[in-house]
Amino acid sequence: MLPLSIFFSDEYRLLTRQQLTRNLGQYFAVPDQFLVDSWQALSPHFPVISPVEPETPPVIALPPAHPLTAAAANQRFNQYLKQLELPAPSTLLINPADLHPRYEALKRSSIQDGLCHRLHVLALAARENGHQLTLHPPNEATIELTLDILATTLTLPGLEHWGDLGICLHTSSKRALPTLAWLEHLGRSLNVSIPIKLITGMPDTNEILSAQHAGYTCYPVLTDPEHCRIGQQLCLQFIQSLNNTRLRASLLSHQPLHTYAQLPAQPSDIFLPVRNNASSPPVGQTLTNDALTQALEQYAVHSLDVGPLINGESLKSPETHERLSPSHAGLTIGQLCSTTEEQVRAAFDCALDAQSKWNRLGVESRADILQRWAERLQQEQHALVATCVHETGLSVRDALTDLRTAINLCYYYCNQARIKLAPRTLHGHQPEENRLELHGRGIYICLTDHNEPLATALGQLAALLVSGNSVLLHPDPSSASCLSLASEYLWEAGLPSGALALLPGDSQVAHWLVEDYRIAGICCFLGPGRTTDLNRRLASRQGAPVVPLLSHSCMPGTQILDRRLSTSEIQGLLHSAFSHAGQRRATLGTLYIEASIADEIEQQLASGMQQLQLGDPVQLDTDIGPLSRRDLMDQTYQHIERLRLRQRVLAQLELNEQHDHGYYVPPTLLRLYTLDELSAPISGPVLHLIRFEREEMTRVLVEINRCCPGQACGLYSDDDALIDQVTDELQASRLLLNTPLTDMSASIHPSGSSGVSGTGPLYGGPNYLMAFVRERAITRRR
């Protein structure tokens, strides 16, 4: 990373564009103190500077557009063009996000040419009519994209030496000074002046919220008022230094430097003392993209072989199966060695021996080991994500989300264990001492499916192990490699080798596990049918001890719409329905729409769906990858075609040749008239739409309770009476009001199910660990 002092020295003129671009990424997460120390070292040598003058002529900004579709973006482009036809000279503020419905950093390769063409047309019109164009201040997620678009546009014909196409910048950004240096270098290389509009003062609060939600290691903006003054002074010093020969700066506006009652905690600390907040790389930034691409390329040539892991050792078996890539079924990605019956018995022997020692270690020591494991998962996220993408077909963004959820569950369960599983003193008669202890039950069987492969399995391991149990994990074949890698990290963190075994294979392995009388409990993430069969098998074991079964079935969620939605809310619904290719437990499967707004909502969903990109999950800009298994693809297609015969397909994304060789299913909108038409839950990118009249609300709630009891449900409404009715009558384990069915988040959005959807308690909630322990009361008379 380049020191700030270089921007004020003669060496600055020797820097290349490539060096300055890389430096932009490095300053994204620089600590505040680095800027403060640099200022303190430089400020004695700075001259007194003149204040920056306000912008003239007046700046014109059109109302925010937030286009959902290409047609809406075209309409905003025409509005900008019409504004530039007015004769009076002005500065028109252009928001590139208004010119494309997917103005996102990861979409750079697919949207940059079109945006540059549009900006070129606007710039030519502005030059012809004597106007100045200024790009809207980019947020931290899109600043590199915006700079690339500006640089490319300035090289297009007709704009040579114009000098009236510029950009707005927030001086509270940690990258403000490096950005100014980058722009000055651009101006020198093109021999053109670039107008800069500065926004001084405090940062936009949305930047702070976005950093917290994304889990950045630290804020990309300055949050302390005094630090914001330093950032402003650094920018002004560069503008008025001899190193600036191409930037013309003016003051656009000032955000007041208010004083917080308490400065916001760092993104990793916002949920303390309940839990840490797992960090995530700033996807879309050049350095992050390079690191992810390198990991994906590295693991593309690895053979993802997997077999039983017992007592910390990798074992082989005579029965092996080819593992095929979900994105290209003709490509073998490795071999799976199925666990044998003898190996299952050996795993039980090791687990039985290790469990008592692991339990006696104490909750503090167990939590310390699992905390180290969570930190290791954080460090190795590129390797885990790359493995997950190749073997499950999840997009990079979905895999990152899944891993971050898993790490947060680990952090949460560790903190919860320290609080809730510690021995406590009970009341008693004199001279008695009474104590309550909580211990692991014994050996737990953990069965997982394809849904959220990292979050469900790793979160479950953390809960079961920190409670003092040993675990025999039978993963879905589609996610065995990434779980094998995570298991190795767990042993390296200090887990006794016998306390965990990974036992991949077909359903016969699960049958052997369940038949063993040494199990103390079962935790499963399976479909309702498989969970019912498992419960029946447990009940039929004559003479075996009764063991608890905790299940979380994959029942897609339901939402009810009683009002119109904004563009961001429509995009939230599409994300809920189609991210993870419709294979999340929080997936939106059915949407009830009030009849008076149904046509409008259905059109918005169909149009917005066309902006989604279905493709190779290895490509960073892919929104939706293939399904994880062929049988899931076949089941989803059968469901779609059954409804197509009844003319119920409302909209569907088109497929092309690149989708012919993988387990791809296009996002699809389907019409239903009642939930009773669904004979079984569908795990795939399909969203069912049902219209209803307002007076039918009671019938709708009864229907949801009958067909999907205990699943996640939501309501969009401004009617308080309706909100009260839904809250009272809907038997949802998780109810979301005026918000999409978001991903499960430990301690914030716990998830779970009841009835046919599974058994409680909510995983990621405060009562979860209590399901995996046994109580022991000890009385001692002195």
Image: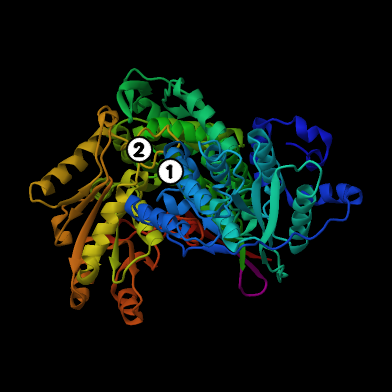
Horizontal side of 597 relative to 390 (left or right) equals left
The answer to whether marks 1 and 2 mark residues whose Cβ atoms lie closer than 8 Å is yes
Q: Position of residue 405 (x, y in %)?
A: 49, 49
Query: Along the line of sight, which residue is nearer the eye, 322 or 435?
Result: 322
| Residue at horizontal 50 percent and vertical 31 percent from the top | 485
Q: Tell me what residue is drawn at x 28 percent, y 48 percent.
A: 531
Q: Bounds of the magenta span?
A: 426-435
Q: Nearer the viewer, residue 131 or 534?
A: 131
Badge number at residue 625:
2
Secondary structure beneath dot 2 equals loop
Residue 400 x %, y %? 48, 42
Q: Which is more toward the observer, 347 or 330?
A: 330
| Above-or-below relation of 52 to 368 | below
- In the picture of the structure, the residue carrying the numbered disc 1 is 398
Question: What scheme was used to colour the molecule?
Answer: rainbow
Residue 578 placed where, x, y %? 33, 48
Relative to 335, 177 lies left or right = right
Q: Residue furthest top?
A: 318
Q: Residue at x 17, y 45 (%)?
A: 640
Residue 470 percent location from the top left of the image:
49, 42
Image quarter in which the N terminus is found? top right
* Label annotation for residue 247: none
Residue at left offset 64%, top offset 31%: 18
Tell me the quarter of the picture where residue 190 sits. top right
